[in-house]
Image (tube, rainbow, N blue to C red):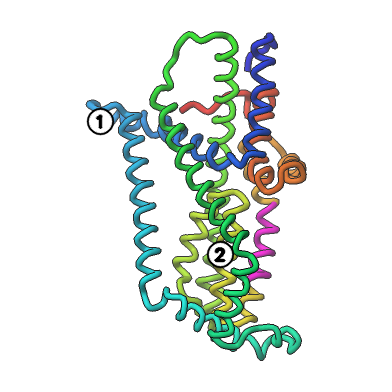
Amino acid sequence: MSNKYTLPVLASYVLALLAGIVILKAGLLFALYAGLLVYSLVHLISPLVEKKIKFVKARIFVLAVLAFLVISLLTTLTLLAISFARSDSGNLHSVLQTLAGVIETARPQIPAWIGGYLPGTADELRELLANWLRTNGHAAENWGQEILRAFIHVLIGMIIGGMIAIHDKPMVLPDFVQALQERAKNLQSAFQRIVFAQVRISAINTIFSAVYLLLILPACDVHLPFSKTMVLITFITGLLPVVGNIISNTIVVTVSITHSLQVALFSLLYMVFIHKFEYFLNAQIIGSQINARAWEILIAMLVMEALFGLPGLISAPIFYAWLKLELGMGYGCDTVKP
């Protein structure tokens, strides 16, 4: 970081601060992450491609491969969802019958005053669902719109990140633009380090989940369906800070309910205990990447969550690493070289 706090440099700090606030308040965090991820991957992989394949423009080639992988993944997920919806197990009646069976199995294991409020047949469940949709239809519609909006933001962020990666070439720029570019490079450096740390965190989380799903439960003569698939999902979703754990835990507990209420409660307690432990372990791993103590990361997460909610909690490690780098306090003040 430049030691000369000229007017253009100070203005770039102010604009960067405002941009960060707007991103968190406007729900653009995942778009930012998607763009930074694509940009980082292109810059990391393209030098390797240049050594192996001399006759292609490495960045364009890498971007094309990434685009193909993303499109293939989305297409596969869409086809799987359509296939499941058209299958016997995916139609509404079968789902309601399964849920009714789960509730009926769990009813003897829960207090009577709670069981009295639970539906007992598929028809009662259908009526309950219909009443809920009539009452909360507008909210459900808003949820769908928010999910679609976030998905579009991610795609746009990936496109922008790819375009910047391709056209990122050294050139003479005005002082203010150059200062802004330095702020952006420092943000990308912080993001890249935190992402690598998050891969380690996801691997540790996956190991704990695999021990529980593939060793502990079978040892107790409990065999959940899709155990190996849930382990894979745990690793993939674990790449998302905070939100990934919520998604994987929800899936594990939901599948556990199909066996019994006791297994579901045990799964919930195990996941809560493990993730409370990992909360501090994560701070330690991330802190080692940005020259910060675990308590610094925890304080940053606490403050950002109080100010901006869940987006603040998710962004806290990266934004704190960015702040330390700008202040000349982060990992030797060096940006990550692509």
Q: Considering depth in this image, is 321 or 257 the residue closer to the camera?
A: 257
For label 1, the crowd category at 10 Å Cα-Cα, with few meaning under 14, some 14 to 19 and many 20 or more, is few
Task: Residue at 67% x, 16% y: name it.
Answer: 11
Percent position of residue 197, x then y: 57, 43
Percent position of residue 277, x then y: 69, 57
The quadrant in which residue 285 appears is top right
Residue at image mark 2: 209
62 relative position to 293: left or right: left
236 relative position to 112: left or right: left
Say whether residue 321 is magenta: no
Disc 1 residue type (three-letter): Ile
Q: Is residue 190 visible?
A: yes
Q: Is residue 330 visible?
A: no
Q: SS at mark 1?
A: loop
Task: Residue at 55% x, 76% y: name it.
Answer: 217
How far separated are the C-alphas under marks 2 and 1?
Answer: 40 Å
Q: Which residues are magenta?
A: 268-279
Task: Residue at 75% x, 41% y: name it.
Answer: 307
Residue at image mark 1: 53
Q: Considering depth in this image, is 284 or 61 the residue closer to the camera?
A: 61
Quadrant, the N terminus: top right
The quadrant in which residue 9 appears is top right
For label 2, the crowd category at 10 Å Cα-Cα, with few meaning under 14, some 14 to 19 and many 20 or more, is many
Which mark is first along the chain, 1 or 2? Answer: 1
Say whether residue 277 is magenta: yes
18 relative position to 104: left or right: right
Q: Quick check: 280 above or below 65?
A: below
Disc 2 residue type (three-letter): Ser
Q: Considering depth in this image, is 205 or 43 the residue closer to the camera?
A: 43
Q: SS at mark 2?
A: helix
